[in-house]
Amino acid sequence: MGDSENSEQEIQTKPVVEKQPDLPKFEKEQSDKITAKFGSKTEIAFVKPNRIRVNVKKEDILDVASFIRDELNYDHAESVTGVDFPEAKEIEVVYHLGSYTDPHLDKQVLSLATRTAREDDPNPGKDSTRLPSLRDIFYSVEFHERECFEMLGVFFDGHPDNRRLLLPEDWADLPPLRKDFAIKGR
Amino acid sequence: MTTQLPPGIQLEKVDERIMTLNVGPQHPGSGHMRLIIRVDGDRIVSCDPDPGYVHRGEEKMAEYRNYITNIPHLERPVIHDSCNILYPYCLGVEELLGLEVSERAKYVRVIASELNRFTYTLYWLAIYGIFLGHSTMFMWPAGDREFAIDLLEKLTGARVTHAYFVPGGVRNDLPANFEDVCLRQVNYLEKRLKTYGDIFYDNPILISRTEKTGVLSRQDAIRLGTTGTVLRASGVDYDLRVKEPYDVYDELDVHTNVLKHGDSYDRSKTPWLDMLESCNIIRQALEKIPKSGSVRVKLKPNPKGGNDEVYKRVESGRGSLGAYIVSRGKPEPYRVKLSVGSFRNLICMPYLLKGEKLGNMPAVYWSLNYWPVEADR
């Protein structure tokens, strides 16, 4: 009888802890490693189950990508996506990285995102819309970066082969995935 | 003589020994893409793949249509595997809109996507057969494919362009008596597939043409970021149905087929083994599917996603197929990117064809399980 009263009191006196949303443990560890190494240079945009997104400045992307490959064991790029943000006058490039060699990373996809300046009157390859190429770090980005160059006009410094890929050779219009390239009738 | 050339057109210096061949884009040996091959005698010196002949701007079109009206055109890059190409898009939109899919719909999706793997892979096998001069291997898969197509027609109403998957489930329920017909035809297809093994994969002519040609080592397969059957033929055990199971694949017993040599023979055998595995998966799904229940969530018109992004991937007939969807609180997605297996495997071509005999080009090219239309999007 006395025991149960005590335990009831204990329960009542326990401080009420506000429950934080549980971040997935493994993904949190991974993102903490990146933060511990690079500090304020990187920004962890989100940590979701099996998905992490890291935003970096374009000056730091080579260092961060090398760290992700060498220390976190990501070994290939699944896709490279360019996203146009005309209001912010920026173009974002997102690398989705995965791993075949590390069984712990089977489910993981790490998005590494960076941004570059966007010019209203683009001159692909000759204007300020350029980024360092990750081809020396993740070899598999070669064709993806070529696609990004022609579709958004982002020139990749250090890429050996910044040529057209999908578009016709005589394409002389805006890069088509920019928002100001409008489809007729829409 | 200085004539003004149109932009993008260059004159090429003719070399004495090296000859440039344009294979494609309308050559039947390459599909709708061009391979710029430079040959020295019979040997390929270099190969420069030039996709884009059938580029249709699917990603651009997706930015102008809402989440639901995107469905019929996003499957067009690979109509023979249309359920699988819509799968990651639907999974992504479900996460963006917060939809819960019913258990029965998940099983129907598994059945439809495995049947689609059949129709795609049999089509591919038919082409692979005819390009190696084995015309029986063209006729048989092309004929047997009709059984799988009939099943999908019963299920979805269309022979190839199904547009069957929708965010929140599938478009309509299984027709009456579908389970029995499906089981019977899948059993028949499995029996036929085993005959293919006898006539094609044990055929000494096929073996002599494809063995040790276009060898992709395990390290290179990983470094080049290949996927699907190409990756698994090189000895990497990676199948998303097992590694990152989506929908109900974690409740099914899926065996991953891994071969180790990484040559054209292994690359052509892995899809066939996958089809045999699909038979097992369909049988398990037919057994476990809940007998009743809804298959589609009722949606509001023009549903809007929040300020979010999502990357979902599934295992298609050609490997991992990812959909990256960026939403900015509008009924239309802000950006849709399809990361397709064919495009990811394209990077192998210059590596595998270099130093190979020109006559081996079709054997290597088609063993990559490459679908030009999908790579171009």
Image (tube, helix red, strand yellow):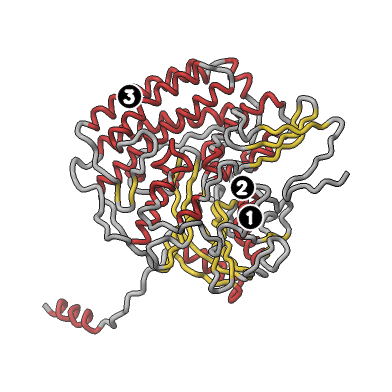
- Residue under numbered circle 2: A166
Between marks 3 and 1 in the image, the one whose residue lies nearer the viewer: 1
Q: Is residue B275 left or right of residue A18?
A: right
Q: Residue at x 56, y 71 (%)?
A: A35
Which label sits on residue A150? 1
Image position of B114 with respect to A78: above or below: above
- Amino acid at circle 2: Leu
- Circles 1 and 2 in contact, beta carbons < 8 Å: yes
Q: Chain of mark 2?
A: A
- Amino acid at circle 3: Asn
Q: Residue at x 42, y 35 (%)?
A: B117
Residue sitting at the far left: A1
Return the residue nearer the eye: A165 or A38. A165
Return the residue nearer the eye: B167 or B368. B167
Return the residue nearer the eye: A130 or B232. A130
Is residue A167 visible in the rendered structure shown here?
yes
Between marks 3 and 2 in the image, the one whose residue lies nearer the viewer: 2
Q: Is residue A35 left or right of residue B358?
A: left
Q: Chain of mark 3?
A: B
Q: Chain of mark 1?
A: A
